[in-house]
Structure formats: C-alpha cells, structure tokens
Amino acid sequence: MRKPSAVLGSAVFFLAAPGIVAGLVPWLLTANHGLPLASAAFVISGSMLVAVGLGVLLHAFARFAVEGSGTPAPVAPTERLVIGGAYRHVRNPMYVAVLAIILGQALIFAHGPLVAYAIAIGAAMAAFVRFYEEPVLTRRYGAQYQAYRNNVPGWLPRLTPWRGDG
C-alpha cells in the first residue's frame, strides 16, 4: 500500500473505530443527562487522560501509515510489523489510549456507566487481541513478532523503550 492511501485509510479507520468507540458512544451515554462536571481534581485528571490518550492514539495511527505502509484496519494491514514509537513501550497502544479516553470522560463527568462501558470495551479488546490479532500477527511475521511479543508487554507500558528490532 502506498503511503498516501495508507494515510487516508488510517484516517477513515480512525473515524470509524476509535471515533465511535471513544467519542460517539460515550457522548451518547452522557448526552441529555444534564451531567455536571465532577470535582476540579477529577476534571483535571480526566482531561489529562483524554489528552494523553488522544495524543498516543494519533501517534499510533500515524506509525501504521508511515512505518508500516498500511492501516490498523484488518482489511488493509501493514506491509511491515509496526514496532516503533509508542509500540516500543506497549504492544497495544491504540487500545490503551482508547480506554484512557473513555475513563478520562468518566472522570470528567463522574459518570459510572462510562466506567462500566470501559470495562466492557476493554474485555472485548482483550478477546480480539488474544483470539484474532495475536494469531494473525504470529502467522504473518513469525519470529519477528514473537521476539517483539516476548519483550514488550501487551497492556501495561514498560517505562523504557524496547530497543530490539525483532
């Protein structure tokens, strides 16, 4: 896949997947409920989670287009295994970022249903990774993915970046 089409494909997938999961659905869950903002500490903490999550999410999507010449969408995968940037700290930065965005909104609005939604989404993501992504990546990239998987945690980021190249 050429880079311009990878960038366009990633942008479309960004709107279709995390845009709906971390944007539209939380908005629908909180809209028309007259939710007040939480305490200042919760609003600040939640805003930081949303901002950091959005930054990591945008960075991770860009890595797919630039480093992998593909998209995060299973229908237009990368040509190469993406292991740079945030992927040197955690294997699933997009999912972690989406969960941070949802939980940040839950803090901002002190809205329990968003916490329950984040738990459900997290469970669905973990199942998708375990039963679809990991087997596909193992078949596609073999030993390179296995070395990466052995050195980079899936969900809790390592503090220092992994320096291996797979």
Image: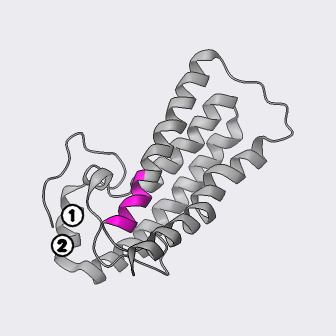
Q: Position of residue 118 (x, y in %)?
A: 59, 47
Q: Which residues are magenta?
A: 59-66
Based on the picture, tell me whether residue 142 belongs to the magenta stretch: no
Could you tell whether 16 is left or right of 5 in the image? right
Residue 141: name its quadrant.
bottom left
Q: On the image, numbered disc 1 is attached to which residue? A: 148
Q: Position of residue 89 (x, y in %)?
A: 27, 49
Q: What's the residue at 49%, 73% (across, down)?
A: 73
Dominant secondary structure (helix, strand or loop) of the stretch shown in magenta? helix
Q: On the image, numbered disc 2 is attached to which residue? A: 144
Based on the picture, tell me whether residue 60 belongs to the magenta stretch: yes
Amino acid type of the residue tagged 2 in the rendering: Gln
Q: Position of residue 56 (x, y in %)?
A: 42, 47
Q: What's the residue at 46%, 51% (across, down)?
A: 57
In the depicted structure, whether residue 148 falls above or below residue 94? below
In the depicted structure, whether residue 156 falls above or below residue 111? below
Could you tell whether 96 is left or right of 31 in the image? left
Q: Position of residue 34 (x, y in %)?
A: 85, 31
Between the residue at mark 2 and the residue at mark 1, the CA separation in whole angstroms equals 6 Å
